Amino acid sequence: MSDGTTRKSMPGKRWSVILVVGAVAGLLALTYPAGLWDHLSLDAFARNRVALKQLVEDNPILAPAAFMAVHAVAVSFPIATIFKVMAGFLFGWAAGGLYAAVAATAGAMILFQATRMMSSGYVRDLAAANASLFTREFEAGAFSYLLVMRLAPFVPFFAVSVVPGLFDVRIKTFMIATAIGILPGALCFAWLGQGLDEAFEAASSDGRALVVSDLVTSEITAALFALTLVAVLAAIVRRVWGPQAS
């Protein structure tokens, strides 16, 4: 009975995933040619930074709330890093980094929950039926794996938010690992955002627009990789000695 129900539900769930992916792809296809992303660039921010700074000063409560709401949605798109830099410029590196981390965690939770709802039990039942080594390992050490992927600067944010939703990962585990893993990078980019005025002036003197890669120093990159390595080593230690300790 359950097998028949699962087989009947498979096409509907597959189509729901296709529709959501298609909607996101369609949104990108429509907004990119229209130039929407041009207004969410560092160059556009440079032109409006004085007005935005004044807006934040005039609205000390509403401004952070509005920023976090927009950033929570923006994590699904390629301009999320810009928001972390903007957070440091607008709110200072400590408060800005915290706002960015909270917003990104909320956005990741939305993606995670949406994936779980769309896949429902189909993908998880399929994974359980296959009982693959990867599935068992990932679900058993979900916190460690998620923390490593969140800390690693080269792993796409969107993928780390969606893929765990296809497995039997507890929402509490996902939320805590995401919040901890996001915070160091958010603080680093917010710290870089404090020096935007000087960076904008330097880029302007060179006759070009400022891009995020101009801000990311080798020290910041090395620090994030070092944090990732620590998380990887912790996961290895837990995997090798954990069962013996228990």
Image (cartoon, grey):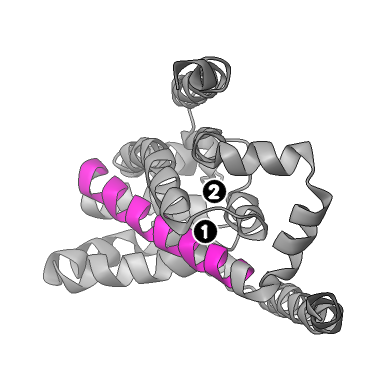
Q: Is residue 59 left or right of residue 176?
A: left
Placement of the C terminus among the 4 image quadrants: top left
Residue in front for this viewpoint, 132 or 56 = 132
Q: Is residue 76 left or right of residue 123?
A: left
Q: Residue 186 is drawn in which quadrant?
A: top left
Q: Residue at x 35, y 53 (%)?
A: 100
Above-or-below relation of 119 to 148: below
Q: Can you identify the residue that label 2 sits on?
A: 209
The span from disc 2 to disc 1 (Cα, nearest Å) is 10 Å
Is there CB contact under 8 Å for labels 2 and 1?
yes
Q: Secondary structure at mark 2?
A: loop
Q: Position of residue 159 (x, y in %)?
A: 65, 52
Q: Can you identify the residue that label 1 sits on?
A: 41
Of circles 2 and 1, the one toward us is 1
Above-or-below relation of 189 to 10: above
Residue in front for this viewpoint, 177 or 140 = 140
Q: Amino acid at mark 1?
A: Ser
Q: Residue 112 is drawn in which quadrant?
A: bottom right
Q: Which residues are magenta?
A: 93-115
Q: Is residue 96 magenta?
A: yes
Q: Position of residue 52 (x, y in %)?
A: 28, 65
**Label disc, if present, on residue 54 of the rendered structure:** none
